[in-house]
Amino acid sequence: MSVRLRYAPSPTGDPHVGNIRTALWAWLHARRHGGDFIVRLEDTDQSRAVDGSLERILASLRWLGVDWDEGPDIGGPHAPYVQSQRLHRYHAAVEELVGGGAAYRCFCTPEELSALRKQQQAEKRPTGYEGTCRALPSAEVTSRIAGGEASVVRFRMPDDGVTAFTDALRGEISVDNSTQEDFVILKSDGFPTYHLAHVVDDHAMEITHITRGEEWIPSAPRHVRLFEALDYDVPELVHTPVILGPDGGKLSKRHGAKSVLEYAEDGYIAAALLNFLINIGWSLDGETEVVPLEKLLEVFDIHDLGVSPAAFDTTKLEWMNGVYLREMPERLLSELFAVRLERDLPGDVARPLDRAFVEELTPLVRERMKLLSELAPMVDFFFATDIATPDSGALLGKRYRKRPDVARGLLAAAADGIEGIEGWAVELIESRLRELAAELEEKPGDLFMLCRLAVTGKPVTPPLFETMEIVGPERCVERLRAAASSLDSVATEA
RNA sequence: GCCGCAUUCGUCUAGUGGCCCAGGACACCGCCCUCUCAAGGCGGAGAUCAGGGGUUCGAAUCCCCUAUGCGGCACCA
């Protein structure tokens, strides 16, 4: 039988990296084994629903390159893939369970239950439902319902013995039934709880592996009992370790967790984020960090996952993003650059950008950045018609602080020197400036820094001569002269 | 409080009884390359495998206990 895995998010906002990593693993496992990957929306809690969540969830998956065979947007043989549209199925299951005595109606109010909990805590007893409505006569149940009294349906857990199940990563886990309470499967608003809903759906949708965060381990015994009561086979249970924040706490919005879409925004590329996420809790061979998707699709298996919680190391993510940036084919990368620049560059730069021009500067910056968001500030001077010359302090630096006149002279000489170059090209610019440095008995590096500051306005830039070539002779000369004259006042004073 | 899960360099990991006085990667430090910054190359430092007991000729690897961390204990998922 072919493998079927699912991603079953709740529409409570944008998916965060911890959540999406589990989806990624499930997807990879399905694809690697030629199975299906399904997306199902678990919206049984109307009060927590956030508008637009589904779209954002699907957009996050798409951005990462994840595809699905069945889902809320495309349907499939087990449609609908939205739990709020499958209510009758849960009701049918509830009926079956109640009919067979495995579940029962409970009329305890939330107020009564919280009072009970308080009392239990005060008496230092384990908290939990104590079976108040377990043995209500059916006549009473019927009349109270008829009387319009609110009620829920609870599933009856065994009083003694143990419930055991196998976690695919951790092996057998068992709990004493004495620690288990009769839990709610149908809420008073007619919606099922997660426990019931996912059991019904995972069975109906023929899911073979339930993948979810390890915070579900404590309630897994409930699910196992539910599967059995409904006479369903229990799928393989795969509980994924949590991702920790830098401070060791569970990664959450408070602890630096960002949504997938935010990473996109910040200039991470999808393949890098995917690779990085996959590697938290999984490793190809202990040596290889950069694992291409094709390789993952060839070897990934969900049973190879680790089990210990792991911290999310943003620094390493950035490194990996840099690796992907450097490895990307140049055409693709420059296209990415163009799109990003059109978004990030100042408004006075005309759009659309000249693709050929962007392609020219791509090799100059590609290995100097980790994030796409660093791009615009790094190359803005290529696009600006005129740039702000650094103030004299920055322009002179330590080297020329005490001899601004020398700096002014160098700048002017450089302008003159390059102005006459026939056939503007990297090698010619470089040799001309080197000659100049030799003639004037200045260190080449010092002259170059002056030129760099003048032409780009920045102390840190791509290689000078390549940069100058792209900026073009006119603008270079112009900027060098502007820088020289900006020193006039300082030089005279000196 | 009760229950559960986890525990290898700062971080991500390799490792399933001898190849490990523990390997790789990020970060860090040094050197090289060099017009700045990166990238790259080379090298370094960094883990008594949480602690303690066993089992075994032999344990990071198996068992037990303890500690710590995390998670769960809702008509939320």
Image: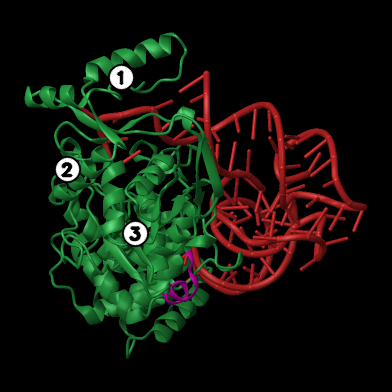
Sequence-first disc among 2 and 1: 2
Q: Nearer the viewer, residue A379 or A118?
A: A118
Sequence-first disc among 3 and 1: 1
- Numbered mark located on residue A132 in the image: 1
Residue matched to label 3: A374
The red chain is: B
Residue matched to label 2: A50
Letter of the chain that mark 3 sits on in the rendering:
A
Position of residue A43 relative to residue A479, above or below, is above
> Where is residue A10 shown, x and y percent of the image?
25, 47
Position of residue B41 relative to residue A267, above or below, is below
What's the residue type where badge 1 is placed?
Thr
Q: Secondary structure at mark 3?
A: helix
Q: Residue at x 27, y 61 (%)?
A: A205
What's the residue type where badge 2 is placed?
Val
Q: Residue at x 30, y 76 (%)?
A: A334
Task: Using residue A86 as the reference point, say whether residue A239 is left or right of it.
Answer: right
Position of residue A319 relative to residue A85, above or below, is below
> Where is residue B72 shown, x and y percent of the image?
40, 33
Please check the rendered image and state whether residue A298 is part of the magenta-colored stretch, yes or no. Answer: yes
- The stretch of residues the image draws in magenta is A293-301
Q: Colour of chain A?
A: green
